[in-house]
Structures are given as structure tokens and as C-alpha cells.
Image: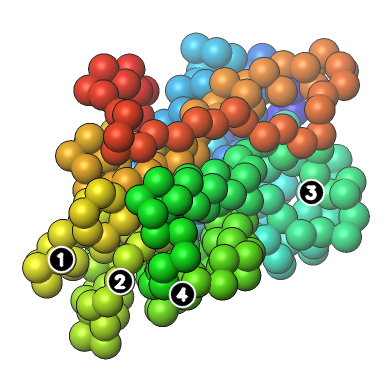
Amino acid sequence: MKMTVLAIAICLSVLLCGCRSDVQTVTEDSEDNLIVVGFSQVGAESEWRVANTESIKAALSSENGYELIYSDARQEQENQIRAIRTFIQQNVDYIVFSPKVETGWNSILQEAKEADIPVIMIDRDIDVQDEALYRVYIGSDFYKEGDKAVQWLEELLEKQGRRDEPIKIVHIQGTMGSTAQVGRTEALEQAVKGNPNWEIVAQECGDFTRAKTYEVVREILKQTRDIDVVYCENDGEALGAIDAMEEAGLKCDASDGVIVISFDATRLGLEYCLKGKIGLDVECNPLQGPYVDWIIRRLELGERVEREKHIDETQFDCFTITQEMIDDRKY
Ligand code: AHR
């Protein structure tokens, strides 16, 4: 394990430069036998994100042999870059981060590579020219998630005898440029190309939050109420869209009203699915902590690890979900 004694001096210098830092310091009495991990999280925009943070913190705990330095970037890529730079200066053993967007990481990851600190990316992917800039990526296959959603919609419309009817879709996107948004958007847009009767009548960013989506959908409803499907890129957005539609007197019901599609399958999202308000909730699994722990242990032993891993995920729809399924969920 590396020594981490420079931490306090570095954080002091960051403060003296007038820069904001939410990065915790490594304690002076850090035990040398702990594996020091710097973790830069995007923020706390959703239930999913909170569950993801808790999973990492639980897996990389001191009881498990880690010293975790946690940094919340509050949705700002610059904060993530600053946190990673601080981790490098602190000479941590590993850097774990969940990138807000796919681009803009080359320089900072080059610095990590030069410092010989392995980088493990979780959740979202990045677009870099040199693959050696990170060791491992563990996250979701977001295009596959979107594809599951559009296939479910095609089958539902077929069963309802609406295969050739005009289908008007409102599309609420997640944080623009994030892998979750890019993959889920691409799957929908391809399906729209393949179904000439489907039309995206509005496409707006809800930033993965309930509050923003509520405002955005309220505005959309001033332009049109002729909506068959609302495709939201996470549960927070689905809940915000439902709030706005119900307030405007629209019924959210996959059998007899607006079909709401969502992603994440958090407990709250699934409760809405059980009530029939969300038609389909495609799982996005945030419980990535145990995988990160497993990978670090392999790397510590000098063993080879898979470079990219997509987590297995399922889906729930309002026709088959039960209370027992929700009770079994861990987030
Ligand atoms: O990157 C995963 C996405 O980010 C989740 O779908 C969303 O809830 C989160 O904020």
C-alpha cells in the first residue's frame, strides 16, 4: 500500500487557491495495510445514484480492508476532474469513478496513468483514444436496456391491435452526453426509424430528476395532450412526468391511457409499476460495490481481470409485477 501523508498539505493548498473541494482527506494515521481508494461520484441526482454510492461505500469499507476517500461532484465534470487530480496527488492505490459524460477525460486519465494508479470506471463509459487510460469498466449495457424497452412496446402495441396506428411519443432524456442517455436514446431513435407510424412529438432533457421533468412535461402539455407513450430515461423522470400528466388530467395506464416507460427499477419506480402507472421499468443495477471489491482483490494479487463487464439486468412490467417482487429488491 502506498503512503498517503501528503493529503492534508494538498487539500490545504487547494483551499488556499480558492478552489472548492468536496474531497475528504486521507487521515494522517491511515493504516498502512488498508487499500486506499479515491472514489469520485457524479452526484446524488436519483434514487439509483444514492443506492450506487451506498453500494460502493459498503463494499470498500474499513472492515473490508479499505480506506475510501469519497468525493461528490455535484453533477459537475470539473469537480470530478479536480477530485481525480487530488487523488493522484494523494497517491491513492486505486481511483474509482463514475463519469458524468463520455468525453473530456483524456488529460486527467493520462495523469493517472503516468502516476501508475489503476483507474476503475463504474456505471457509465467514456470515449478515449487510448484504452490503456483505464483498467476496468463495470456498468450497464444502456443500449440493451433501451432495446428491451422498445421491444416490449412493439409487442404491447401488437397485442393491443395498434401496430399500424400512429403512436405519438414524448421522449425525456437523461443528462446529455452520459452513456445512460446515449444508449437509451439510440435504442428509441432506431426503433422510431424502424416503425414509420411512431413519431417523437417532443424530445427534452429531464436531467434524470423528478423536479426538472415535472417542469418540462408541464410545458410539453401546453403544446399537446395527444400523447400515447412517454419514454423516460430513469425512474425520477417517470415520476415527474406522471405528476405533470395526472395534474393535467391525463391517465397513466398501459392498458387504457398513456404508456409510461422507465429505467432503473428502484423500489419507488416499481411501486408505480404495481399501481399500473409505469407500464415497463427496465432494471439498471446500481449494486456495483461488490464487483469493484472483487476486481481490486484480483488486481492486488496480480491476476488478470476482464476489461469490460456489463451487469446482468432484468425488467418488470405492470401486467406481471407482484408485491413479493418489490419486497425482494435491495434498493
Ligand atoms: O447512469 C445510470 C443512470 O444515472 C441511472 O439510470 C439514473 O437514475 C442515474 O442518475
Residue under pointer 3:
112
Residue 298 at x, y percent in the picture: 77, 17
Foreground tag (4 vs 3): 4
Q: Which amino acid does label 3 sit on?
A: Ala
Q: Determine crowd level at label 3: few under 14, some 14-19, many 20+ residues with C-alpha closer than 10 A.
A: many
Q: Is 286 located above or below residue 253 in the figure?
A: above
Q: Is 302 located above or below residue 228 in the figure?
A: above
Residue under pointer 2:
227
- The quadrant in which residue 107 appears is bottom right
Q: Determine crowd level at label 1: few under 14, some 14-19, many 20+ residues with C-alpha closer than 10 A.
A: some
Residue 317 visible? The answer is yes
Mark 4 and mark 3 lie on one chain; the one further toward the N terminus is 3
Marker disc for residue 250:
1
Q: Which amino acid does label 2 sit on?
A: Ile
Marker disc for residue 200:
4
Residue 218 at x, y percent in the picture: 21, 76
- Of residue 127 and residue 263, the one placed in the foreground of this image is 263
Foreground tag (3 vs 1): 1
Circles 1 and 2: CB atoms closer than 8 Å: yes
